[in-house]
Image: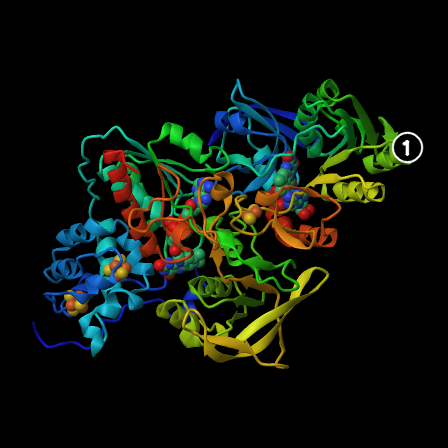
Amino acid sequence: MGKIIPNKNPMREQPPEERIKNFNEVPYGYSPEEAIAEAHRCLQCKKPLCVDGCPVEIDIPGFIGFIAEKKFKEGIVRLKEKNILPAICGRVCPQEEQCERECILGKKYEPVAIGRLERFLADWERENIEIEIPVLPKSTGKKVAVVGAGPAGITAAADLVRFGHTVEIFEALHEPGGVLVYGIPEFRLPKAIVFKEIDFLSKMGVRLHTDTVIGMIKSLDELLEEYDAIFLGTGAGLPWFMGIPGENLNRLYSANEYLTRANLMKAYLFPKYKTPIAKGKRVATVGGGNVAMDCARTALRLGAEESILIYRRAKEQMPARNEEIHHAEEEGVNFQLLTNPIAFHGENGWVKEAECIRMELGEPDDSGRRRPVPIDGSNIKIPVDIVIIAIGNSPNPLIPATTPDLEITRKETIVTDLQTGKTTKRGVFAGGDVATGAATVILAMGAGKTAAKGIHEYLTSGEW
Amino acid sequence: MVKILHKEHIVPNIHEFIVAAPDIAKKARAGQFVIVIPDKYAERIPITIADWDNEQGTISILFLEIGAGTQSLAALNTGDEIFSFTGPLGRSFEIKKYGTVGLVGGCYGIGAIYPLAKALKECGNKVVCYSEARSRFLLYWNEKLESVADEVRYSTTDGSLGSKGHSHDLLKENLESGEYYDMVFAVGCTYMMYKIAHTTKPYGINTIVSMNPVMIDGTGMCGACRLEVGGETKFACVDGPHFDGHKINWDIVLDRRKAYIEEEIISKERL
Ligand SMILES: Cc1cc2nc3c(=O)[nH]c(=O)nc-3n(C[C@H](O)[C@H](O)[C@H](O)COP(=O)(O)OP(=O)(O)OC[C@H]3O[C@@H](n4cnc5c(N)ncnc54)[C@H](O)[C@@H]3O)c2cc1C
Ligand SMILES: Cc1cc2nc3c(=O)[nH]c(=O)nc-3n(C[C@H](O)[C@H](O)[C@H](O)COP(=O)(O)OP(=O)(O)OC[C@H]3O[C@@H](n4cnc5c(N)ncnc54)[C@H](O)[C@@H]3O)c2cc1C
Ligand code: SF4
Ligand code: SF4
Ligand code: FES
């Protein structure tokens, strides 16, 4: 081991003034030389703390060691033992709160760029070698229905086929991928990558039924007549509004609607793709998470002259990944922090103004963050022609509404045993955002893995 | 993908497709809808299930050719595959014995009230249908409706069949002359449903309207279809599309209708 290099090898990216004019991915990824250099920064710890920070416990020093030795193929195999979607996680995991936060180097210097290395290997594999299909065990004769083709469902399905079960996925939309496809924009996660990863599943024999809304076309009880177990990975898709005056004005969107139009329906290629999306000069996004950053940055790319982000707390408390906040700032998003909308005003039905009140930070609340308190009389009016509400989502109520014996919590999440993925209904398992409320891709994947184990145990023991 | 088994141009500007969709046919109930994407580039278009045949495994849809989306749909022919076809979606009408029911249908709604009339009749209701169009040659499914309803009353703007004017004019006349309905259902263009709700209100007749806001996913995920009903925000795709016509905030509905006017024009010009 040579001298410690204090900083991460930088990753080249599109310059901000260029990239706000297109939907191409922002960072370019490491070249093999850059990846090898970065891999050499890793100390190959005997007790790697980084692994504790990864929800799916990837052998991080293991795959990084292979990169350092230029054995990319061995590296990707090691990586995929624990994570079948590395090209995605390498791009969207909040590494600074997970693996990289625990990395020993990070105590004094910058941590090893684990996410970038993960992305490098996955991209290298996709671009250079025919992806190998793992040898599957003999069929168990058991059939499992996976509902929802988001990261939780995809991961559960992949593990279940590898246990030898027959797996079919049912997805409500016309494309699989969940939020990866309808929510996270192209410039952050190219859809071709997501489809390639999903293609891997069908190569392993998983059958995918799109356009299939479970709860409507089939109830869970009807599915249980055909399948031995069910995994619910239906996500948290129901958008919240603020419940303040003016929210039904035209050109006021939920983040889901705005992003679904832009991503899933490809409205950014309008009019080649026919789904319209409003293009405004002054676009205000309300919220401070990844979703809000994605909306504010999408608005710029759709031609907004001013993309304003309205968030009621301070920057330090924003739930978005640092990288997203940084990218949004570079691109010129106008942050109106400690500011909260109290009403939207319109003209002939079209939104024209966001009336906001300034906030200050008071005592910490349940989440441990200092609670924002409105400052009396500090009202301001921000002229806008589009507003996007990105303040959160709760689980889609369709399945619980049509399955009375499935217990849900007060937050509308499905009651799920986190150790096994079991719900309160025999044969039905759940995981991901539908069980935890809106969280992250990697946690949804972790939940999919846990449930796959739980399902396998149930199917082999027959015991609930 | 589903296959179009039969396409018919039933009246100028309205097409009927019969498609092979056995799973949907098994589950369909009056008042539910499907979301259709005609081809890879098209929008997601909500369309009511106008009829279904569980034995044949088919469902029928009727649609008005208006903008770019429905034009791409109309461009498909018998034997073609529809890129994406999802359903059944939404809640069905509540089918039970009400007594005497009035069903009002205009444009695609004439087709949509057919399964409703059939189901309500089977439940023992007296069913009176009101079918309206601009002119006689734009009315369709007359015999079909007559075969299931106790009575079908026509109104045309030019007076070429039935009474001259709109169905709300005719309904108003009938109510004024002492007719009574235990329940009224209206399906068709927004303005027609608004007028019907307006007409029945003074008589205190419960009126269900089938709202048709802009939709995307149709599963409760985007909020595009939201309406204000009785002061609360509702998502038409999962909470509806049928709501109490007297509780709807019509001002908001009529404003939201025009949300994409400019884009609709661009998209149509490109075709
Ligand atoms: C805009 C945006 C940006 C984000 N950015 C990040 C990020 O940078 N990093 C990160 O880690 N996380 C991010 N997240 C969060 C992350 O995407 C989610 O936590 C994750 O996708 C949850 O996975 P899931 O499989 O539980 O659900 P989802 O991804 O929501 O997938 C659920 C799937 O189930 C389908 N479905 C729902 N109901 C039914 C039904 N009845 N029948 C059939 N199918 C059904 C849905 O159509 C959907 O495809 C972001 C989320 C959003 C919205
Ligand atoms: C639950 C539901 C059921 C429906 N059932 C049917 C049906 O059975 N048959 C049928 O023909 N149509 C039905 N509609 C309406 C249909 O979805 C629209 O006509 C269609 O989306 C218009 O798409 P377009 O691209 O052709 O037109 P656009 O270019 O989107 O619009 C052209 C014109 O139509 C108006 N328009 C847009 N959307 C709608 C709408 N949802 N309803 C009425 N006018 C609209 C616009 O304001 C514009 O003036 C239904 C809608 C809903 C929500
Ligand atoms: S999956 Fe996420 S948390 Fe785990 S090592 Fe990769 S980037 Fe880090
Ligand atoms: S903690 Fe950091 S230095 Fe140690 S093995 Fe993990 S990545 Fe390498
Ligand atoms: S159409 Fe998206 S929520 Fe109703």
The residue where tag 1 is placed is: B178
On whether ligand 2 comes within 8 Å of the CB at mark 1, the answer is no
Q: Is residue B158 above or below residue A192?
A: above
User: Where, by quadrant of the figure, is residue A200 drawn?
Assistant: top left
Q: Is residue A37 visible?
A: no
Q: Residue at x 27, y 58 (%)?
A: A55
Q: Nearer the viewer, residue B268 or A174?
A: A174
Q: In which quadrant is the C terminus of chain A drawn? A: top left
Would residue A16 appear left or right of B53 to someone viewing this image?
A: left
Residue A346 in picture, x, y percent from top left: 69, 65
Q: Is residue A399 visible?
A: yes
Q: In which quadrant is the N terminus of chain A drawn? A: bottom left
User: Where, by quadrant of the figure, is residue A66 drawn?
Assistant: bottom left
Q: Residue at x 15, y 54 (%)?
A: A75
Q: Chain of mark 1?
A: B
Residue A274 in picture, x, y percent from top left: 54, 47
Would residue A265 appear left or right of A6 to someone viewing this image?
A: right
Residue B109 in picture, x, y percent from top left: 70, 33
Q: Amino acid at mark 1?
A: Gly
Is label 1 in a helix, a strand or a loop? loop
Residue B246 in picture, x, y percent from top left: 75, 46
The crowding category of the residue bearing disc 1, from other C-alpha atoms within 10 Å (few below 14, some 14 to 19, many at least 20), is few
